[in-house]
Structures are given as structure tokens and as C-alpha cells.
Image (tube, rainbow, N blue to C red):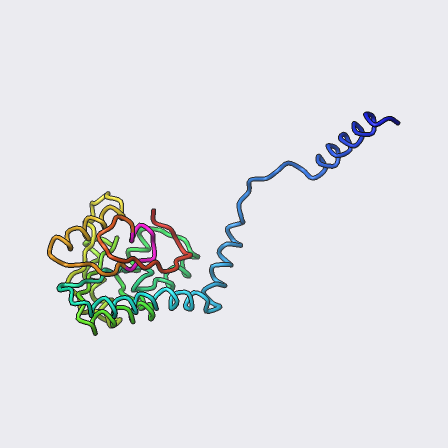
Amino acid sequence: MNAIHTSLLSALLAVALGSCTGPATREPTNLSTVKAEVAAYVNSGNYQVDLADAAAPAKAWITQRSHSGTSKSAVVFDIDETTLSNLGHMKQADWGYQSDSWSKWVMTGKATALTPVREIYQTAKANHVTVFFITGRRESEKAATARNLRQQGMGEYQAIYVRSDASKTPVGLFKTSVRKRITEQGYTIIANIGDQQSDLDGGYAERTFKLPNPFYLIP
């Protein structure tokens, strides 16, 4: 058998073997597998470790920056999965989202503080830094949110900014516009704390600190 025939036979054999493996798939990781991975991440304690690791530099920066003599320093916090955890609701909902059940959950005021972030809040208060909350929650949920924050030891702040019930403005644009408004009131936002990149993009903060959130994404 000459070299040409040998090469042709090898090529045909490779094609035949390849066809036995079936067509290539674009199937993503099964949703049940992903949910199990998220649950394991939380239950293992790794989520809390990552939260603490993300919070540590924020506390150090706020302490350092607050001693620089800047007047009207401020820290901005997001709420959901930043200062307050909705794990109880998310587990009950099998990591899904439904707007009506979410609103009912918010109105119960049963979300719990994320301890490492409450420590950032306490650091800001101890260093006489003004606290603002900016959240994608709605005006109809504001009173319940304020009560929840107070019950979780974060009841002293300058303002909570929420969206109107009818607003269709993307959350990121809303939060940027509020930070701009805060700076126009003469404040220097030395730190902006959030779990979504959309909490942090848009400027009007000296430093941003991103917390882990494997549960959902808000663009």
C-alpha cells in the first residue's frame, strides 16, 4: 500500500471514529446541578468567608479615608445581598424569582443582616461617615425596608433612596443618578458597596467594593 492510500485510509478511519461520538452539543450545565452548587457554596461556609474577605478592605479604607480631614464624607450601600440577605426567601423559592412572592417577602421585613457588611456600616458610623442606602426596591416597600434595617442594627442613616413603583429606569442608571445627586449636596462618596456590578458602575465614588453574589444578576 503506497503512502497516498495509507493517508487516505487513516483520514477515513478518523472520520468514521469521530462520527461514533455523536454531534457536538451546546447544552449548558444542567440547572439542577447549578442550584446544587450554589447551595453547597452557601452551606459550606465559603460564601460567608468570601463576604468577609470582600468587606475587610472596605473597612480598612473607610477608617483610613475618614481621617484625612474631608468634610461630609459618605458611604453608599446597596441593600439586597449587600446589607440584607434574602437567603431564606431564595431557598424557599428554589433559587427562582417571582415578583409577587418577592414583594410579599420584602414586606415581612425578615431579611437578615450580612454580618461582614454590617461591620462596614458600623465602621462608617464609628468614624462619623454619613450613610446612604440606594436600592432597586420600590417606594411601596420603603417603610418595610426601613423597619428591617432598624431591626438588623442599621437604622441610622441620612436617607434611603428607592425607585417609584412605576419606574422603568434600569437599576444601574437610577443608582448612578442618585449618587450624582448626593455629590451635588456636597458629599464626597468615599466608598460604594454592592453585590452587582450595576451597583458600582457609573462613577461618583472614590472606591467601589464588590461583594459575591452567586444567586442572581442585575445588568
Q: Is residue 196 magenta?
A: yes
Inspect the magenta stretch and tell me whether residue 209 lies in it.
no
Q: Residue at x 25, y 72 (%)?
A: 123
| Left or right: residue 155 compared with residue 23 | left
Q: Quadrant of residue 209?
A: bottom left
**Span shown in magenta:** 193-200
State the residue at coordinates (16%, 61%): 159
Residue 86 picture location, percent across and down? 34, 62
- Residue 13 in which image quadrant: top right
Q: Residue at x 14, y 59 (%)?
A: 187
Most foreground residue, 13 or 20:
13
Q: Position of residue 97 (x, y in %)?
A: 37, 52
Nearer to me, 67 or 47: 67
**Foreground: 158 or 92?**
158
- Which residue appears at 29% of the width and 71% of the height? 119
Which residue lies most toward the left here?
185
Image coordinates for residue 89, horizontal then vertical, percent? 37, 61
View extreme (front): residue: 68
Relative horizontal placement of residue 55, taking residue 165 as reference (left or right): right
Considering only vertical position in the picture, is 91 above or below 203? below
